[in-house]
Image (cartoon, helix red, strand yellow):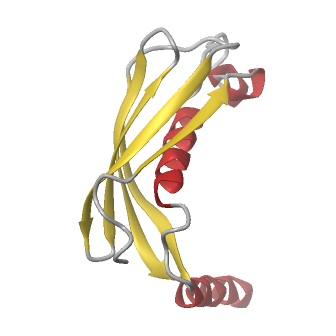
Amino acid sequence: MSQLTPGLSGQTNKLVETADLASAFGNPGADVLSSMTLMTLLEQSCLMAIEGRLQDGQLTVGARMEMDHMAPTPPGFTVTAVAELSEVKGAKLVFQVSANDGVEQVAKAVHVRYVVDKERFFKGVEQKSAKRSQS
């Protein structure tokens, strides 16, 4: 994990479309970017910050997202999310993330991810799936 150091940054962009609106997720009349879609964009920027820096056999999993959705964004706007890796503590990665729609800041967040062993992680998923099959 020596390639994972504070200061790494990543960015993603998203054109807000009809499928991204809160109204598309069951909030009638709220034709603005949904918090769910925004959270996904923020998470993607964190993944971009560490892209290509994990060791073979590793992946990261999201553990926590604390987001302030500060302003609405209508369709047709492009939202840009920027993440910076602010802390590396063993397997724990902490990111500071913000998003802007070209007019104003629309979100800020802290996102925590953990570096895990891919094989072990998917073995646990498989074991859990098997328990459901037995029920």
In front of the other: 3 or 48:
3
Q: Residue 52's quadrant in the figure?
A: bottom right
Q: Is residue 38 left or right of residue 22?
A: left
Q: Is residue 19 left or right of residue 132?
A: right
| Image quadrant occupied by the C terminus | bottom right
**Which residue occupies 31% across, 69% down?**
92
**Which residue occupies 51% across, 45% down?**
45
Count the marks: how many?
Answer: 0
In front of the other: 32 or 59:
59
Q: Residue 99's quadrant in the figure?
A: top left
Is 105 above or below relative to 96?
above
**Which residue occupies 39% across, 71% down?**
3
Is 70 above or below relative to 109?
above
**Which residue occupies 76% across, 21% down?**
18
Q: Is residue 44 left or right of residue 29?
A: left
In front of the other: 87 or 9:
9
